[in-house]
Amino acid sequence: MGKSVQSTISSEDKKILHQPQEEFQFPRCNTQFDKNCITLAYNKKSHPQVQAVVEFIQNEHDLPDKEIHPVDTEDDLDTYLFDHPNTTVAGLVFRFDSEANPDTIPSDSKFFIQINETTIYTYVGVDDYLDVFVPIQISLQKALFKVIGEYDLDLDITYMKYPHPQLLPSDIIPSAGSNFWFWAILFQMVIQLSQIVEEKETRKRFGMRMMGLSDFSYWMSWFILDFGVLLISIFILIATGAMFGFNFFLHNSFATYFVLFLLFGLNVVALSFLLSTLIKKAKTATMVGFGLFCLFTILNSVASTVIYSDLVPKVVGILFAFLSPVVFSKGINDLAQFTLTEDDPGLKWKNIGDTTEIFPLSTCYLWLLLDFAIYLILALYMDNVVPGEIGTAKKPWYFLTKEYWKGVQREHKKIHLSSSDDSDSSSSSNSNSDSDSDSNSNSDSNHGKKRQKNNNDKKFEDLDVKRLRKQLITGTESKKSVVKIYGMTKIFRKNFLKKTIKDFKAVDDLYLTMESEQLLALLGPNGSGKTTTINMLTGLFPPTEGTAKIYGKSILSEISQVRDNLGVCPQHDILWDELTAREHIKMFSGLKNLPKDQIPKEIEDRLAEVDLADVANQRVGSYSGGMKRRLSVAIALTGSAEVVLLDEPTTGMDPVARRHVWEIIEKAKKKRVILLTTHSMEEADILSDKIAIIAAGKLRCVGSSLHLKNKFGTGYRISIIAKEGKISGVKKMVKRKFPKANFLGETITTITIEIPRKKNKQLPQFFEYLEENQKGLGISDFSVSLTTLEEVFLNIADRAANERILEMKEKIGDDEKALEELEKNMKTTHYSEKFPKKNFSNKKKKKKKKKSKKDLNKNINSSKNSLSETSSSNSDQD
Ligand SMILES: Nc1ncnc2c1ncn2[C@@H]1O[C@H](COP(=O)(O)OP(=O)(O)OP(=O)(O)O)[C@@H](O)[C@H]1O
């Protein structure tokens, strides 16, 4: 960087000048560029007078022999110059038309000076091609006069440029400086934007929110980080600018440019916040960031010259003022105009209102402040209304609701009993004002319809589930219950404004309790609503209906107190590869508001608990999948969380690692309440005190593993191993003893039978019989086992599918359109909930209806199969 010649006319000095060229310097070739360079090449090297001419020039300018290259002919000279490009300053061509006396130069001779324009500026003391040509011409003429006429000619020839305004040296800042400062700060927007979106994409924000991070703290932490980095960049820019002696920084008052940079820095942060709310992928964020960077660079080049000039109406400037980078461009260009020359005094703070007629610097400051406020408010608004990582968002008018300003969701109002089952069933009638919430009216007609629906729903309900509901409604649940879920429902709405057939009920009127020092295993097929239940309990999004209380605190109105007691291990690890396990626990301890002096002990305890103490200082990026999962469990246990929600904590682990985590959970259970979701029946069987199975969002059964096996298992499974050829005899004997036995499998030596539970009294006799007749029947061994939890699971899933089928059939009614919708929805979503009823009278329609019903049945069967398949594939995983 340095000075450049600007063709701008000084405002003070516009006098017209013509300055004679200073004394010429002979254009020697530059040996610094090329050691073997040539200053003059010439032809007719053997002509004595030509040689004399060249010697004269050589002596006059003290040229060494190696810088002179003589050749014979004109063609030789051309060949030499062509073959040695950019090495020779000039060629002298001597052309004699008549050669009467070979020793003299005839009077009709011609002389040419060949010069190379390509490398002209590499010669010493040369700015222009005339600087090469003129001195050689003078020197040649002098030499000719001397050699031919023996006349000493003291020529003083020079050239003079046309009169022109004075050329003034000026600072590079006005032309390039503003771009440089502009890019340096704006580029941070690209970086910040992709960082924020990356955190969103990898669900880290979601994980921290689950663990109690408020939106305010989240945005504040980004603001402090981003603005802090920008502030440092600004100080470095100013310091280096001043160090290199830029008048922009030395002559203008510090406040004039510092305030400008500072306000633009704030805008860059707010703009990246705003854009981050609209973008879901980090790659897209980088692309959008670069796109905007280019766009603003283009606008930067026309900000002062076009947008804020007399060329366009004022309103255009006002519209562009909503883009803070354009305002910044205008401001910085204005400031630069005050330091064009060394003599310019720069701008003083008191003059910021008089910089230009249109948009003076003071106006730029105000607009930057306004833009910052607009971007920030828009960012916070969009953050709430644009569906985020988990696809939920608030209504566009959320900020007009009382709940928003009071900071709580509307509380569960009353629980009423359903008429069909006064003693057993009920439904909650509250409705939350959350965006997804169904604004459930309590009008009589709606109430009646709802009751009817509840009656249908409860028809298939298990007695334990009914009893639990009743206990919760009447407040007679176990005193040990510390987590109580009251009719929690979640409907994912497709449309903010109205209910549509595509709305999806992920959790349906769930009543459940969890007792202290117990582990509840929440089982269910994929998509049955387990994670949604956990997300509601952590306050990630509120239930559409119903509520839950954890240690007496409502998840709707006291979520921050609830979170103090809550630990969550999400389904997918939410960890920072760059941080160590120790740093993770430290960070989450902070989020849990653990006192500072307790944090070191907490770190040691948690890491020891999950056996990660040895690798506590290693970056998590180097951990195996199992280690990461263990760290996630440790994070869930951090801060002495009394209620721990573990969403599939052992997914993807090998059997050894899985058993290790089981031990951790088993130990952790002692002082806590744990909710565990898993697809491993073995895991649930081993760890759980109570099991709840949900399917299609509804609680289907609840109780201990043994209770469920007894209740929903098909009975006892007996395997008999016999010698080859004896199996048919054994089979006949079993049929005789248990005519209703179910033969599950048979090989040439083995047979597996299922005996109904009600026949259990006959089993001792049967085993005695087997022992007594072992030899006669050819039996080598036999064993008996109770139904597995997996069978219970499949059984329940199957019942749920059947129930769905019946519900659907009831719902179809006569509406052909609804049938079509249903078919479509069964393909896209799992089940559909709302079907308007309509009567069909004519035969043609009935026929159509029959056909549709047939199609529907086909779909229902496939749905049933897929549900069973899901269940079995889940169990297969284990
Ligand atoms: N934000 C959302 N918007 C719309 N539908 C959703 C949303 N979140 C979840 N769902 C749907 O709700 C249903 C229940 O999902 P959830 O994640 O709770 O199931 P899950 O029982 O945890 O399943 P898995 O065992 O596979 O983890 C699924 O059909 C899912 O597609």
Image (cartoon, helix red, strand yellow):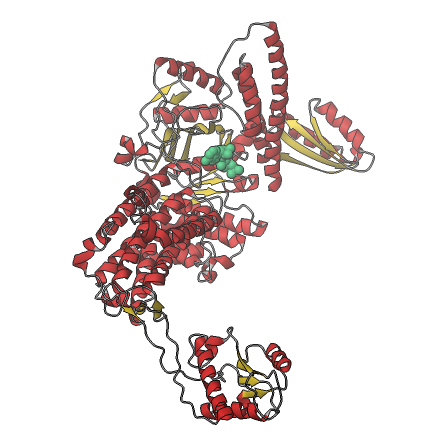
Total label count? Answer: 0
Vertical placement of residue 731 versus 269, above or below:
above
Task: Residue 795: tell me if it is visible.
Answer: yes
Task: Tell me what residue is drawn at x 54 percent, y 45 percent.
Answer: 651
Task: Tell me what residue is drawn at x 53 percent, y 88 percent.
Answer: 67
Judge from the rendering whether residue 599 lies leftward or rightward of residue 751; answer left or right.
left
Task: Tell me what residue is drawn at x 42 percent, y 20 percent.
Answer: 424
Q: Residue furthest left?
A: 350
Instruction: Please state, as top left, top right, bottom left or bottom right, where the C terminus lies in the image.
Output: top right
How far across and down, in percent of the image, does residue 419 sit? 40, 14
- Between 745 and 374, the one lying in front of the other is 374
Vertical placement of residue 485 versus 171, above or below:
above
Task: Residue 673: tell me if it is visible.
Answer: no
How far across and down, in percent of the image, does residue 280 sit? 45, 44
Q: Residue furthest top?
A: 842
Figure quadrant of residue 774: top right
- Between 410 and 251, the one lying in front of the other is 251
How far across and down, in percent of the image, does residue 663 sit? 50, 49
How far across and down, in percent of the image, does residue 512 sit? 42, 31
Vertical placement of residue 872 versus 607, above or below:
above
Figure quadrant of residue 782: top right
Task: Tell me what residue is drawn at x 23 percent, y 69 percent.
Answer: 343
Judge from the rendering whether residue 556 lies leftward or rightward of residue 688; answer left or right.
left
- Between 782 and 164, the one lying in front of the other is 164
Judge from the rendering whether residue 216 lies leftward or rightward of residue 74; answer left or right.
left
Instruction: Please state, as top left, top right, bottom left or bottom right, where the N terminus lies in the image.
Output: bottom left
Q: Residue furthest right?
A: 725
